[in-house]
Amino acid sequence: MYVEFNSTIVESKDIKDTIEKNTEFKVLKDMSKGSKREDILAFNLSVAINTLNDLLEDENNLKDLTEDELFEEYLSLAEEIAMDIEEYVPDGAVLDIKAYKWDKSDDGISLVIIIAPEDINDLKLKDIMRKLITQVE
């Protein structure tokens, strides 16, 4: 799927490849068409628990956290490091990221990321995210 950002045409496959090559994230699915919009890119991502543990061990003793606390730490850290993807998206794009699941079979945290033109309003972005999260759950 192709999307225009500030007069630059971007293919979702190129962004997917860039994410996988330059970050700790694995793209599980290109959700761009599922958004039913022609002006955004959306991906279902996963980041390995081991990667998050390496980052968390610097700040916390993981054994002191309950499973619920650890889950919350994983979600917030996954969203935080996903913001690094911003440096690989086209100029004039904004990100919305939502971690939603600890996939124990894959041993990773699953996220949805939306890459949208900066002129899209926050309310519309949140509505799109709500629809995409419903699709992956």
Image (cartoon, rainbow, N blue to C red):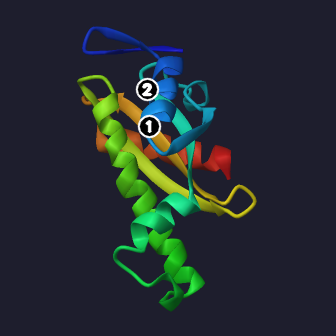
Residue at 38% x, 39% y is 124
Residues 2 and 35: in front is 2
Taking the image as drawn, is residue 120 in sight?
A: no
Q: Is 25 located above or below residue 31 in the figure?
A: below
Taking the image as drawn, is residue 22 in sight?
A: yes
Q: Is 3 located above or below residue 85 in the figure?
A: above
Residue at 54% x, 15% y is 1
**Could you say which quadrant of the image residue 43 lies in?**
top right
As helix, strand or loop, the secondary structure at mark 1 comes to strand
Residues 101 and 39: in front is 101
Residue position marked by numbered label 2 in the rendering: 40
Tag on residue 114? 1
Q: Is residue 57 left or right of residue 33?
A: left
Residue at 31% x, 43% y is 122
Contact, CB < 8 Å: mark 2 with mark 1? yes
Q: Is residue 60 left or right of residue 135?
A: left
Residues 99 and 54: in front is 54
Residue 130, image x, y percentages:
52, 48
As helix, strand or loop, the secondary structure at mark 2 comes to loop
Q: Amino acid at mark 2?
A: Ile
Residues 50 and 85: in front is 50
